Image (tube, rainbow, N blue to C red):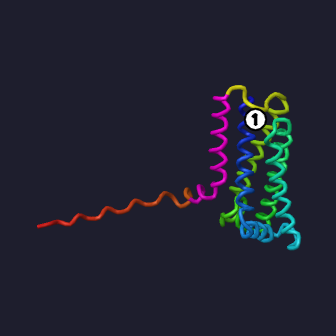
Amino acid sequence: MTYVAFACRILLFGVFLLALAGKVRSRTAFASFARSITDLRLFPRKVSRAAAAAVIAGEVAVLLLLVPPRTASLGLAAAVLLLLAFTAGIVVALRGGRRAPCRCFGASATPLGPLHVVRNLILAGTGAAGFAVMTALPAAGWPAHAGGGAVAAVAAVVAALLVARLDDLAALFRTGWPAPVAARPRAVHK
């Protein structure tokens, strides 16, 4: 079970790190993120920039708490709460007919939708599972065997990268694979 908790921590650390990096990589990226919050109309326009800064602060707090084993369970709990808050905001916006671009990882122009709700709920469930394991097994900080820890870490990193590119993957499957290039007829030489 230590490997489960370890993988949950790494997955959420990766997701929150990629999300944070996408939002703060430039002033333009942060402004786009803040504008997406304004477009969702969850807060008054003047509060939206402060809400964007609060999201950044929350993501930084989660990252800092997830690393040390002694605060990792608190980091998992904070991640779950933040993900549930994001999910609630998305649901409220969708029910109000507002589909602003998802700037969750910075650059995506994909409008928020049910896929984002499901993604966040799965991530929140991951955090809850990690939290449950860590509270049930206080020694569930670092894996006992390097090989098992490496497998858990690689799986979690791959999952984090897939989560970060979820909009692109969903678009790929919505439009289908590119049609094969038609074979050119061969010229007949006489």
Residue 133 pos. (x, y %): 80, 32
Kindly indicate the quadrant of the structure image that contains residue 174. Answer: bottom right
Give the secondary structure at mark 1. helix
Q: Is residue 187 left or right of residue 122?
A: left
Residue nearer the viewer, 142 or 136: 142
Asked if residue 157 is positioned above or below residue 174 in the image, the reply reads above
**Mark 1 — residue?**
5
Depth order, front residue of 125/91: 125
- In this rendering, the answer to whether 14 lies above or below 146 is below
Q: Position of residue 123 (x, y in %)?
A: 74, 47
One can see residue 92 in this view: yes
How many other residues sit within 10 Å of disc 1, few (<14), some (14-19) or many (≥20)? many
Look at 63% across and 39% down and name the residue there: 154
Q: Residue furthest left?
A: 190
Say left or right for 165 vs 139: left
Residue 99 visible in rendering: no
Against 107, is 2 above or below?
A: above
Read off the magenta span. Answer: 146-171
Which residue of the protein is positioned furthest toward the top in this rendering? 144
- Where is residue 8? Give x, y as percent: 73, 39
Three-letter amino acid code at the position of disc 1: Ala
